Amino acid sequence: MTSSYITTPIYYINAQPHIGHAYSTMLADAISRSRRLLGHDVFFLTGTDEHGQKVERAAQKAGVPTPRFADEVSAAFRQMCADLSISNDDFIRTTEPRHYAAAQEIWTRVQKAGDIYKGDYEGWYCTVDEIFVPEAQLVDGRCPNCGGKVERVKEESYYFRLSKYQQPLLDFYRDHPDFVQPAFRLNEVRAFVEAGLQDLSISRTSFKWGVPVPGDPAHVMYVWFDALTNYLTALGFGSNAPDADARITRYWPTVTHFIGKEIVRQHALYWPAFLMSAGLPPPRRIVAHGFWLMGGAKMSKSLGNVARYQDYVQVFGLDALRYFVMREMPLGQDANFADDGVLTRYNADLANDLGNLVSRTITMIHRYCGGVVPAPAAASQPLDADLAEAVTGTIRSAVADFEAHLVSQALQTIWSLIGRVNKYIVEREPWTLAKDPARRPVLETTLYHSADALRVIAALIDPVMPHASERIRRMLGVEKERWTGLSGGTRFEGARLGEAEALFPRIEKTVEELRENAMTNESTPTPPSAAPLPAQTAAAAAGGSAVPADDSRITFDDFMKVDLRVARVLAAEAVPKSKKLIKLRIDVGTEERTIVAGIAEAYTPEQLVGRTIVVVANLKPAKLMGIESNGMVLAATQEGLPSLLVADPGIPPGTRVR
Ligand code: MSP
């Protein structure tokens, strides 16, 4: 069985987790889940990096003993994993005894290799990034990385002979061109190594919050020396565990470290050098993603421009947040985190594209086939064969994208298929086919292929949206499947559907209204352990919950303000370039007027002419696709398919409805 070892950075605990930390964790989670779907034996690690001056100072500032401070903030990162449905197999803390053992073991090995010597360090140190900054690299006297203040440090220190590894590192990069993804990041590191390496200070004496250096406890290890070792600790390195060697052999050669782009040097340069010195192979791969920006700058605690993942889970639901960040950030590039971006993607990609496909397919199988997936006709037409081919092609390319860690690209591919199936349904018009018993085989074939495509879509979105995927499977009456068996035409006719439910109800509120809502709800935050399901939160956010929490009943007078009238459709035509809209000419008794209605997915224009419908007659005019609409047609929309409210044909236009 293929093994896969996946890691996130271990996070500093000087502050609470935010979207940036959440993103790395969700990305590594999506990849871990995709590997499991491919049948791999996955070990997925995350955790917290608890030592160093920065954390010690944060604890002092909070007036809390450092170990207690560490326990509390580390617990917030563990909670983040639960809130985000992270499927990690282990959560490591660098303050655990198992980690002290591993860090000291690697130090001892490096020392035995003759690569550690004692000296003095005098120079600059950036506590935010926990890095030593050579004088020549200062930018206007500040840290070149974060732009923060640097401090002058002068203390006794152990050094690592990094200079000795210049050539071995260059050889290693040459032999492993795919070591860092994206590749241009490896070029940057290579250029840095080619410029010449200086030995690296790897211990500190001016504070105590760290792993003691073996044999010289006046020194604690430089936090990066200690932190990088966590990836080995979790496999049992440095312990007497009977299975440690077997686990290291099984997982270490497969390890992929997911990190942000600012810590590539530590992972692609220091870490392989430490490992080479200790007689261990460098990691298999480093995947470096870009930054989430807010207001044009990197989201970070020091700038104060951070978004809390909890707020987005509460308003949009967990799967929607996971979808947004995975879709919006192509690997390696920076992306903007903006509320209107999240809302737009929610409504367009989730409520509209995916949500409609799910509700239509499920509703029609319930309505026309008694809730049982029908069998496709033996001979399919080109339209069906094309769709089946698109499904197979999507499986191939989305799986390859996940294997290459290109999650955004995979989602784009999957969404093209969603668009394609929606189009297939509109072209086939199952609602029209259903009226003609002679066309029953075509209806059943159409519904079968739509359901089959949906089965595949549910499986492919699983790593990113595990809950939505599970809910679609429940509605379709199918079990979770491995990706390896996805194509090959798994036939599932006869499956009994579960109950239809709204997956991602449209949010009609504006970003401003959502913010206001969030502010008024602040006193009753959602308990983090009970991350709400998307449907519940979104419906609540949209004011569409079935049982209103507050008394939202209206008075009789309010109701009487709505002028509902019977109207007759005189003419109807499709609105060009719109999938949904039909332009109607209606007679409301006193006059003729134009109304634009979103009913094209359920009715053809010809089916509408002559019908006696009900409209809201006193609505202010609105422009839809450039056409002024005067009023609104009433329809009961069940799972995305509108069904018109009609009056008896004998009732004259203009009659008031109450
Ligand atoms: N403790 C070190 C990592 C040690 S790994 C052996 C560290 N910790 S950190 O808390 O600062 O976390 C940094 C990581 O959080 C980044 O590498 C990235 O994965 C994630 N992010 C933090 N802010 C981010 C953004 N604004 N955007 C995207 N990811 C960001 O460095």
Image (cartoon, rainbow, N blue to C red):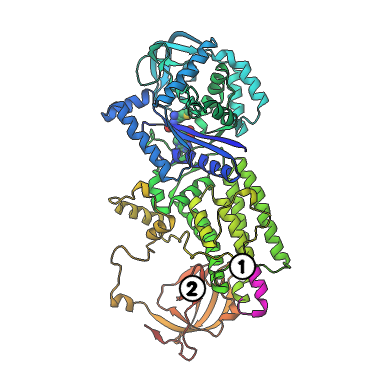
State which region is magenta.
434-446
Helix, strand or loop at mark 1: helix
Q: Is residue 475 above or below residue 58?
A: below
Q: Which residue is mark 2?
A: 629
Asked if the residue at label 2 sits under 8 Å from ligand 1, the reply is no
Q: Few, some or many C-alpha atoms within 10 Å of disc 1 (few <14, some 14-19, many ≥20)? A: many
Using the rendered image of the protein, determine whether residue 625 is visible from the camera's viewpoint.
no
Name the front one of labels 2 and 1.
1
State the image coordinates of residue 555 (x, y, percent, origin top left).
Answer: 28, 74
Q: Which residue is mark 1?
A: 447
Extreme residue in the left direction: 63
State the image coordinates of residue 114 (x, y, percent, origin top left).
Answer: 54, 9
Query: What's the residue at 45%, 90% (across, down)?
Result: 651
* CB under 8 Å between discs 2 and 1: no
Q: Is residue 65 above or below residue 476?
A: above
514 falls in the magenta region = no
Helix, strand or loop at mark 2: strand
State the image coordinates of residue 253 (x, y, percent, origin top left).
Answer: 60, 29
The quarter of the displayed image where residue 163 is located: top right
Q: CA distance from mark 2 to mark 1?
A: 34 Å
Q: Is residue 145 above or below residue 27?
A: above
Going from the N terminus, do you reach mark 2 or mark 1 first?
1
